[in-house]
Amino acid sequence: MLTMGNSTCLSPCVSLSPCDSLSPSLSPHPKFPNPNPNSFLLSHPPFAPISLRSNQTPSRFKKLLSPNAPNCFVVASAKGELLKVIISGAPASGKGTQCELITQKYGLVHISAGDLLRAEIASASENGKLAKEYMEKGQLVPNEIVAMMVKERLLQPDSQQRGWLLDGYPRSSSQAAALEDYGIRPDVFILLDVSEDILVERVVGRRLDPLTGKIYHLKYSPPQNDEIASRLTQRFDDTEEKVKLRLRTHHENVDDVLSVYKDITVEVNGNVAKENVFEQIDAALTHVAEQRKVNSGSLAA
Ligand code: AP5
């Protein structure tokens, strides 16, 4: 197994995107008002769709020690052989928190359906206005709005070059079917399992830093200093009343989604400290990569 600094590397580990793109951004984060949330999409020509199915021949992986980012590995490969992960779980189960840790280590592109929707709301578009109505009721936003957003983001060059980590999509059988229709299938489906009383406590204590996009919790992950504390904001749907509606929506749909991914689902105990949750996820991702290495070896032989 390859190691670097204190991190254990996904083995085999792959090259090639610049790791400095993983540093926290100092411009407004997509979770928060952005004058032109579509600017990235508009500034890139449409990317030719390629099949993201996981049964492609695994490529040969290489390790890259990036001088710009001594504590991270970037996972990417020459063509299509990328790590593709879906993370799922009830509201406030810790998806965003774990995505931060996963991207730091594996360099995947984090694509959050909730963040895409909040960016759309911030743009004051018609879709954004409609999305907000549903989000305020704790309901799923119509898939016509969400599906194209997610698909376009998955097909952007960075996702294609580094692999992706899809957070909060799919959340219904029709969304899962849409992904399958697009030929988009993950290597692993991570399900965070957290008890309901803990979820409510996490929701009401959550705060967000509009500058860096970092997620805090007043009790479990408090801000490091007064300057950060003074600028923290709370999401409009982070109340005890709204989380109950969001939980109901989650329970109504979760089994349908799981049935699509049951052969690749890894259930993770999300009730423990975030570092311990990450250990479980890290082990699962390492296992997936090891399996690919074995398959790659047997195909080459
Ligand atoms: P979205 O933004 O995706 O919200 P969610 O699924 O409800 O999940 P959250 O973002 O609330 O929580 P999280 O799991 O990321 O937890 P976090 O890491 O922040 O969606 C919002 C809405 O958009 C939906 O309700 C829906 O209306 C709409 N929507 C989204 N996707 C859609 C789709 N596919 N289709 C249609 N509509 C869609 O952690 C929470 C708190 O806990 C933080 O304070 C954190 O610091 C703390 N914490 C995390 N882990 C731990 C730990 N292990 N120990 C202690 N504290 C922890």
Image (spheres, grey):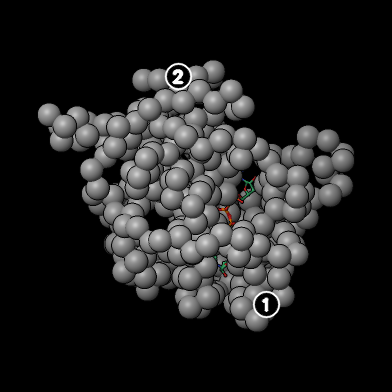
| Residue 125: image tag | 1
SS at mark 2?
A: strand
Along the line of sight, the residue nearer the viewer: 248 or 286: 286
Q: Quadrant of the N terminus?
A: top left
Q: Quadrant of the C terminus?
A: top left
Residue at (29%, 37%) from the top-left corner?
A: 59
- Density class for disc 1 (Cα within 10 Å; few <14, some 14-19, many ≥20) is few
* Residues at circles 2 and 1 in contact by the CB criterion of under 8 Å: no
- Give the x, y percent position of residue 110: 53, 49
The amino acid pointed to by label 1 is Ser
Q: CA distance from mark 2 to mark 1?
A: 46 Å
Q: Does mark 2 have its CB less than 8 Å from ligand 1? A: no
In the rendered image, the vertical position of residue 36 relative to residue 197, given as above or below: below
- Density class for disc 2 (Cα within 10 Å; few <14, some 14-19, many ≥20) is few
Q: Residue furthest front?
A: 45
Q: Earlier in the sequence, mark 2 or mark 1?
A: 2
| Residue 3: image tag | 2
Could one spot residue 6 in this view of the protein? yes
Q: Is residue 6 left or right of residue 48?
A: right
